[in-house]
């Protein structure tokens, strides 16, 4: 099996090559060593690899064993735990190494790693989360890693980079799966806005034609792939995937051709079969003697170019969590909680807010929460200034005569007031956006940054500091917010929701969405976000099925009223504890 990189012909036989210029890395470099979170990406990581029914302690062990045809030596390596001892065995038996090893080592490593990642799908998640960062393997081996002097070939980076398309293609196929599901349920999630992920550098757009009139449909799955149906163009569905090689793109195009009316995945697959002439050329293996057992080493994803094969043989979804229902994509029945997945901030605004927050507040990796306060000092504001903040729009409220929020936050409040008008009951709307002439109140805004794996402890926003009516906006990554009755056990615990639906709920908050907590939702329920890297979420609204949705960076902006005197900072504990 060969891998294709950047549309280049199969790799040269000699391992001594440099194809750095072919990479489309971001400028980000991630140093990986045995102690790093990404250590699983190293070939020496202790992730067992099954080869023809035999378990090898790591990909490294399997690779070294395959240097030799002698079964005793292979077994000796398989049973030797220490990486250094394996290196010694290899050195002591140098004369017995396959004579063609230099020519095949890269292809063997490709296959070894494909197996490792198939057998440990969580590692594919890890890899996808690195996006296009350059991975610097701090391994003393100066071919696979950077060696002791840091100047080695770091070949492992190329190897794992080659695995990305298969993970991404699988994500795309999952998007298609959801898309088909949506088409078969015309009531599913109509939405008024399409977006592409903020984290995507769109390079590759793959489209299929939409079969029927159907308002905008929207899907976001991961920081690297998103899809949208747009009725205004005949591009029904786009996947923006920077990682895809030309070959993978051809494969995907061949696979995602047309979803017939009420389409289903099977229909798309059937269509794909007819377009196989466009699919990537199948690259034969010149190391069949090593990998000749179809069970143990199914074809790579580029083997026959069909979606069916990519679905069955690429990335495997981790199993569903135990005892956890997928988070809903619509509001759970909690009194005073308002969340409508159809209400999404305009894309440009949401992207702009995200960028502003990141650039203004989150330079330093230690900072993940910023609090901003308004103060009510009405006499300092000349009436003309106060009036100029009144909107001509009668549905809109005065934000504050003496706002000290940065203008992007006051602008956001105006937008929120408009887009929640008619969505919220009028008393809740007035609570959040008091009409002109109401007594002035001061707000507090909290801007939270969540990196994948970070959450916020379940809490009720402080009763002695904040009033009723909290409005929050989610930006960047979607994530699941968990709600639990404040007096129940789950309310105080971090983590999974309870089985008792009346006591707990979990809702998926996509990029640009808005939620409001008032009354019971504000006082009698805790809200929190589990510190995890992915969420288990309904495939689409009303579906009983779940999917893992990976998190990337999320920023939330929440506004709440300061109780009188609470705008004087100090003395009271913090509103929330992030972890
Ligand atoms: O990130 C969020 O949406 C919630 C933040 C929150 O609950 C808080 O800051 O009090
Ligand atoms: Fe909160």
Image (cartoon, helix red, strand yellow):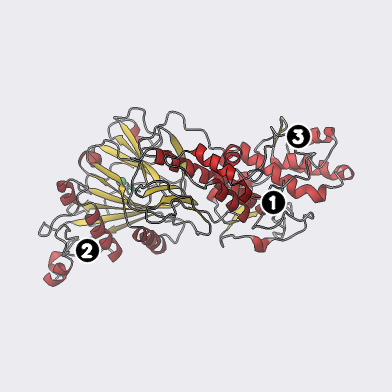
The percent coordinates of residue 301 (x first, y second) are: 63, 44
Q: Residues within 10 Å of mark 2 (few under 14, many from 20)?
A: many
Q: Is residue 168 above or below residue 317?
A: below
Q: Which mark identifies residue 117?
A: none
- Ligand 1 has an atom within 8 Å of the beta carbon of the residue at disc 2: no
Marks 1 and 3: which is nearer the front?
3
The percent coordinates of residue 574 (x first, y second) are: 31, 49
Alpha-carbon span between mark 2 and mark 3 = 68 Å
Closer to the chain start, of discs 1 and 3, is 3
- Ligand 1 has an atom within 8 Å of the beta carbon of the residue at disc 1: no
Q: Which residue is mark 1?
A: 139
Closer to the chain start, of discs 1 and 2, is 1
The percent coordinates of residue 70 (x first, y second) are: 85, 36
In the rendered image, the quadrant that contains the N terminus is: top right
Alpha-carbon span between mark 1 and mark 2 = 54 Å
- The quarter holding residue 568 reads bottom left
Q: Is residue 567 above or below residue 43?
A: below
Q: Which residue is mark 2?
A: 403
> In the rendered view, does 495 fall on the left or right side of 488?
right
- Residue at 81% of width from left, 50% of height from top? 102
Q: Nearer the viewer, residue 540 or 137?
A: 540
- Residue at 55% of width from left, 50% of height from top? 253
Q: Nearer the viewer, residue 140 or 97?
A: 97
Mark 1–mark 2 CB contact (< 8 Å): no
Q: Is residue 45 visible to us here?
A: no
Closer to the chain start, of discs 2 and 3, is 3
Q: Which residue is mark 3?
A: 78
**Residue furthest toward the right?**
95
- Residue at 17% of width from left, 45% of height from top? 425
> In the rendered view, does 203 fall on the left or right side of 66?
left
Mark 1–mark 3 CB contact (< 8 Å): no
């Amino acid at each position: 099996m060969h891998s294709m990189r950047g549309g280049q012909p199969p790799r040269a036989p000699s391992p001594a090559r440099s194809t750095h210029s072919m990479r489309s890395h971001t400028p980000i470099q991630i140093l990986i060593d045995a102690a790093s979170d990404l250590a699983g990406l190293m070939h020496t990581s202790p992730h067992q690899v099954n080869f023809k029914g035999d378990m090898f302690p790591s990909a490294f062990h399997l690779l070294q064993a395959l240097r030799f045809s002698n079964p005793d030596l292979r077994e000796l390596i398989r049973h030797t735990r220490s990486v250094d001892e394996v290196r010694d065995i290899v050195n002591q038996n140098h004369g017995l190494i396959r004579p063609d090893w230099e020519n095949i080592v890269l292809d063997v490593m490709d296959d070894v790693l494909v197996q490792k990642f198939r057998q440990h799908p969580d590692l594919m998640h890890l890899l996808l989360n690195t996006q296009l960062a350059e991975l610097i393997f701090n391994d003393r081996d100066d071919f696979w890693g950077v060696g002791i002097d840091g100047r080695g070939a770091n070949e492992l980076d190329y190897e794992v980079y080659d695995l990305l398309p298969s993970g991404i293609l699988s994500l795309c196929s999952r998007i298609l799966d959801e898309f088909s599901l949506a088409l078969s349920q015309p009531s599913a999630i109509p939405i008024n806005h399409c977006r592409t992920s903020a984290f995507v550098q769109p390079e590759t757009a793959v489209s299929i034609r939409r079969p029927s009139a159907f308002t905008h449909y929207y899907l976001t799955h991961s920081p690297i792939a998103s899809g949208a149906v747009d009725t205004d163009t005949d591009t029904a569905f786009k996947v923006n995937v920077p990682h895809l090689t030309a070959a993978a793109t051809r494969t995907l195009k061949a696979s995602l051709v047309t979803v017939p009316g009420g389409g289903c995945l099977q229909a798309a697959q059937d269509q794909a079969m007819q377009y196989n002439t466009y699919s990537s050329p199948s690259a034969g293996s010149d190391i069949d003697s090593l990998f000749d057992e179809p069970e143990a080493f199914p074809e790579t994803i580029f083997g026959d170019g069909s979606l069916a094969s990519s679905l069955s043989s690429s990335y495997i979804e981790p199993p569903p969590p135990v005892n956890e229902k997928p988070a809903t994509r619509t509001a759970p029945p909690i009194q005073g909680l308002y969340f409508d997945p159809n209400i999404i901030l305009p894309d440009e605004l949401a992207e702009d807010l995200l960028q502003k927050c990141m650039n203004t507040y989150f330079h330093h990796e230690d900072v993940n929460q910023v609090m901003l306060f308004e103060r009510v000092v009405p006499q300092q504001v000349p009436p003309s200034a106060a009036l100029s903040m009144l909107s001509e729009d009668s549905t809109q409220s005065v934000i504050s005569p003496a706002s000290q929020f940065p203008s992007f936050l006051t602008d956001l409040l105006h937008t929120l007031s408009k887009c929640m008008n008619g969505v919220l009951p009028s008393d809740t709307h007035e609570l959040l956006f008091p009409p002109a002439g109401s007594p002035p109140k001061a707000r507090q805004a909290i801007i939270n940054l969540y990196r994948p794996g970070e959450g916020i402890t379940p809490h009720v926003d402080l009763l002695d500091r904040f009033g009723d009516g909290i409005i929050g906006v989610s930006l960047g990554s979607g994530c699941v917010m968990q709600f639990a009755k404040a007096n129940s056990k789950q309310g105080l615990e971090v983590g999974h929701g309870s089985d008792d639906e009346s006591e707990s709920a979990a809702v998926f908050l996509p990029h640009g969405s808005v939620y409001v907590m008032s009354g019971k939702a504000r006082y009698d329920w805790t809200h929190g976000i589990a510190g995890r890297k992915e969420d288990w979420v309904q495939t689409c609204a009303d579906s009983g099925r779940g999917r893992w949705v990976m998190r990337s960076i999320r920023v939330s902006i929440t506004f709440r009223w300061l109780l009188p005197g609470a705008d004087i900072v100090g003395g009271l504990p913090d509103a929330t504890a992030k972890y």
